[in-house]
Image (cartoon, rainbow, N blue to C red):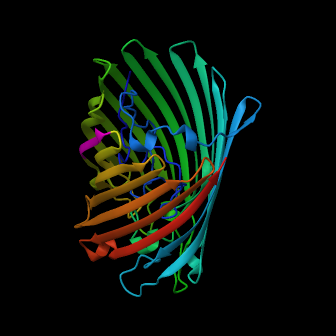
């Protein structure tokens, strides 16, 4: 009955349940290559089961049954595919084209208890390029989680995450030609308590994350240290929701975080910052018509050393899903927030919008078309970076155990100032087959 909004989520379409893995966008990083580096602690929740999107619809004849192991259910999955990229290093000059073999393997193990819960998930993503071996990837991700039900009103959960991740060229710290070569080790733990009673739901969360970036190895042999990007983040989040009706709820939330960089940048000064986000809005799920959320508020960052970099301003988030037909879902998303970067420890305003259409052509055949734009504007530098992406996926589920996917994506990113790096545009094609149990 309740629904809420995240304080800093990248509210972009394409994040619903899917049966196939993408070889263009690594699912280990995020289903959408347009998401920001630091994920939200409290994810958006505006589902009341009044509407079911195309990617969420149950298909009993095509759903993997899993394997029962005592009171747990195991779901293994493997995807093998090939990727063609006409600009593997995301450069403006001296472009290189290449193809890559992609192997993604994963498994989830979840309890089937009536109360409490325990689960584990592990994923790997290996990519081998035919000629440009510096783009090879060995990503992995491990996520343990546990839930304790305290009576009928309180739920407490602890989620961990650790792994090696690769960045997309749409990050906010580096030029695309550096970002596309970057990878980092991340570990995090999130503890959360949720109280639900009558029309009220209250959520409190604390999460601790560490990021350690590997050195950059450029095609010309240059090696660049990234230790100045290493950071530790501690964050407290809270959210209160009140249902006005079974279809509509209002919410207010806040979060504060402390970011400490481990190594001083070129200016020799070790930096830290404190971020504050406050957001209020409305969420809704009107049967057969629309669901979503709209919220607005305040976002700001304050710096311990360079107070002249302090920045604040308007933040907003919106996600709207329309259901013109049972076979069609149309989604619109948007966000604006002020985030921390390691580019001279400068804050920026990150604004993103997206549009997606999910079309069911048959019960086991789905076409997904999405477009997204982003603008990253630094407060202490003249200029901004503008990015956009258009992508299409065709997914065919042949049986419970076997699925196929074809993908194409066009990406473009351009700074308004040469101080913010180079321009990038690229065209990618992907073909893959997924086997699951």
Residue at (57, 12) in percent of width and height: 151
Image quadrant occupied by the N terminus: top left
Q: Where residue 312 sits in the image (x, y, percent)? A: 25, 46
- In the rendered view, would you say 251 is above or below 176? above
Quarter-of-image position of residue 251: top left
**Start-end of magenta stretch:** 313-325
* Left or right: 286 as drawn, with respect to 191: left
Q: Nearer the viewer, residue 203 or 96?
A: 96
Give the residue furthest to the right. 70
Q: Could you tell me if residue 323 is visible in this image?
A: no
Q: How many marks?
A: 0
Q: Position of residue 344 (x, y in %)?
A: 38, 64
Quadrant in the picture for residue 291: top left
- Image location of residue 214, percent across then percent down: 57, 66
Task: Tell me, yes or no, if residue 145 can be seen here.
Answer: yes
Q: Pick the residue in front: 159 or 437.
A: 437
Query: Magenta segment, principal secondary structure?
Result: strand
Seen in the image, is 167 located left or right of residue 348? right
Q: Is residue 142 magenta?
A: no
**Residue 42 x %, y %:** 44, 35
Q: Nearer the viewer, residue 138 or 225?
A: 138
């Amino acid at each position: 009955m309740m629904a809420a909004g995240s304080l800093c989520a990248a509210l972009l379409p394409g994040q619903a349940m899917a049966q196939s893995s993408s070889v263009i966008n690594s699912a280990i990083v995020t289903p959408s290559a347009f998401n920001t580096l630091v994920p939200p602690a409290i994810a958006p929740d505006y589902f009341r089961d009044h509407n079911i999107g195309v990617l969420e619809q149950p298909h009993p004849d095509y759903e993997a049954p899993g394997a029962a192991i005592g009171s747990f259910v195991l779901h293994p999955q493997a995807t093998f595919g090939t990727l063609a990229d006409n600009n593997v290093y995301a450069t403006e000059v001296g472009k290189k084209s290449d193809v890559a073999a992609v192997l993604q393997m994963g498994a989830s193990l979840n309890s089937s208890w009536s109360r409490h819960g325990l689960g584990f998930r592990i994923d790997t993503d290996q990519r081998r390029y035919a000629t440009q071996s510096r783009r090879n990837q060995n990503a992995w991700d491990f996520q343990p989680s546990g839930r304790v039900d305290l009576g009928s009103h309180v739920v407490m959960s602890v989620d961990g995450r650790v792994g090696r991740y690769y960045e997309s060229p749409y990050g906010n710290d580096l030029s695309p030609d550096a970002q596309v070569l970057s990878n980092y080790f991340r570990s995090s733990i999130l503890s959360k308590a949720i109280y639900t009673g009558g029309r009220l739901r209250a959520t409190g969360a604390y999460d601790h994350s560490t990021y350690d970036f590997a050195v950059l190895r450029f095609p010309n042999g240059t090696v660049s240290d990234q230790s100045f990007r290493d950071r530790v983040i501690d964050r407290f989040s809270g959210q209160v929701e009140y249902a006005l009706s079974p279809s509509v709820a209002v919410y207010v939330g806040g979060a504060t975080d402390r970011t400490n960089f481990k190594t001083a940048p070129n200016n020799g000064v070790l930096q830290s910052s404190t971020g504050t986000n406050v957001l209020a809005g409305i969420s809704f799920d009107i049967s057969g018509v629309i669901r979503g959320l709209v919220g607005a508020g305040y976002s700001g960052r304050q710096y311990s050393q360079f107070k002249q970099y302090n920045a604040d301003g308007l933040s907003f988030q919106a996600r709207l899903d329309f259901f013109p037909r049972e076979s069609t879902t149309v989604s619109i998303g948007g966000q604006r927030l002020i985030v921390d970067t390691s580019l001279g420890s400068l804050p920026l305003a990150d604004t993103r919008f997206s549009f997606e259409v999910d079309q069911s052509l048959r019960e086991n055949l789905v076409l997904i078309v999405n477009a997204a734009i982003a603008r990253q504007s630094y407060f202490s530098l003249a200029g901004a970076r503008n990015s956009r992406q258009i992508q299409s996926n065709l997914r065919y589920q042949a049986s419970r155990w076997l699925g196929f996917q074809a993908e194409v994506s066009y990406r473009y990113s351009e700074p308004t100032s040469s101080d913010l790096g180079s321009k990038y545009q690229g065209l990618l094609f992907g073909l893959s087959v997924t086997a699951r149990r």
